[in-house]
Amino acid sequence: MINKRISLDNSKKRIAIIPARGGSKRIPNKNIRDFCGKPMIQHILETATSTKLFDTIHVSTESLKIKEVVNKIGYKIEFMRPDHLADDHTTLAPVLKYVINEYKSLGEEYEEIWLLMACNPLLTADDLINASLILSSKNSNEYPLIAIQEFAAPIEWAYKLNE
């Protein structure tokens, strides 16, 4: 576990926003389902916390059930996401904008906004620290950073043909 905040520029304020909508259709309650002995969302919360990179870690949800789980594992949700930003057609951009504007109204502003997905339990603290080092070596206003992974086989193999 990392014991100190890692950054080439300690003056930068960072927020990690973790969207966790309650209305998943394909896998109901996927963000709080048990994965290796703990709720799925707990993995990313612990990873983000262990890096000491973030001034704020915010779970953006409209679900009281998700809020209850997040609170139970020791994290506080400062404000809930409105229902109109939690439907099947809302993209992440308006959700991020809403969170940033809410924090701005509370007097908090951030130089770096990180989006971490609740259902990514394999992301490691080293991954986030390395991303921070890459981002710090660039002008972050000009170079957004996104993590991608090459699919291990032809992407067509990921699909099944149903009758």
Image: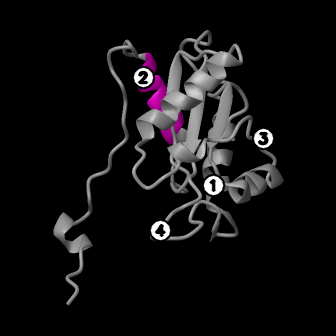
- What's the residue type where badge 2 is placed? Leu
Q: Which residue is mark 4?
A: 25
- In primary-sequence order, the first of circles 4 and 2 is 4
The residue carrying mark 2 is 135
Mark 4 vs mark 2: in front? 4
SS class, disc 4: loop
Residue at which label 1 appears: 41
Name the amino acid, label 3.
Lys
Q: Residue furthest bottom?
A: 163
Q: Are marks 3 and 2 in contact (CB under 8 Å)?
A: no
Residue 47 percent location from the top left of the image: 63, 45
Residue 76 — which label?
3
Q: Which mark is residue 17?
A: none
Helix, strand, or loop for circle 1? helix
Q: Mark 4, residues whose alpha carbon is within 10 Å: few (<14), some, or many (≥20)?
A: few
Which image quarter holds the N terminus? top right
